[in-house]
Image (cartoon, rainbow, N blue to C red):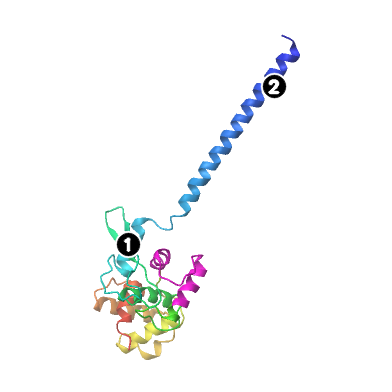
Amino acid sequence: MSKDTLFKRFKDVVLYVVFSMLLIFLMSSFVIENVYSAADQLSMKPQGIATVYSIAIGAQTNGSTTSKDGDNKTSEIQTSDGTTVVITEYALGDTNDEIKDYTQVLYALGFLASQPTNQITDDVQTAIKTYQAMKGLDQNGKLDRSTIISLVAEDIKFEKGNSGKMVQTYQQILVDKQYLAADKATGTFDDATETAVKAFQKANSLTETGKIDANTMKALDALKK
């Protein structure tokens, strides 16, 4: 066998090995990319969903529902501890006490200008579409599964240092119930407001955080005139 022939075969073997390694690398990258892509589809851990529901909305949907077509879509989420969370979807015209919890989130985030309601009105539908657009969700104006999960995942709370219309709204409720002096309803969450919130929480058997969290919001909203 000549040196040229031996060199040619050696070169072919080297090229084959390099090509094979490159092919394996590309295939591995593709698989890993697909795995990460699939993982990105999971917006929340199941346990996280259950925790948020237990705090903000509740893990059950027991209220009576009135629907235009009478067939609200439901789905279930099974959490790691065995808890089953039922999600009921709602569309324009539907009425349910649970809807008010969702509109409260939209209101707190500034997407809904009117007071929270237990019905999906035209205003609520517009607020939902705006929220969906901001979150990159399907802009169908419905409280569908993805939108509901996104809403309950919102960490809404007001604490010392915050300011705005919503803070002033809750301050006024505290004033009306004599937890806060009238001149303190300025829209700025200060020391006096924190003290008032703690007093309100203690009186209503809530955790005394001094922050207007989801449970405190619900208790204060129930006192709105």
Q: Can you give x and y, in whole percent of width and height, for residue 214 in the image? A: 34, 72
Instruction: Give percent across and percent down for residue 30.
Output: 54, 42
Residue shown at the point (56%, 34%) measured from the top left: 24
Amino acid type, residue under disc 2 in the picture: Lys
Looking at the image, residue 53 lies above or below residue 106? above
Q: Residue 115, position in %: x, y?
A: 39, 83
Mark 2 crowd level (few <14, some 14–19, many ≥20, 10 Å Cα) = few
To which residue does mark 2 refer? Answer: 11
Q: For the residue marked with disc 1, what is the amino acid?
A: Thr
Magenta segment: 125-154
- Screen quadrant of the N terminus: top right
Q: Nearer the viewer, mark 2 or mark 1?
A: 2
Q: Which residue is mark 1?
A: 51
Crowding near the residue tagged with mark 1, few <14, some 14–19, many ≥20 C-alpha atoms within 10 Å: some
User: Eyeballing the image, is 188 above or below 88?
Assistant: below
Q: Residue furthest bottom?
A: 182
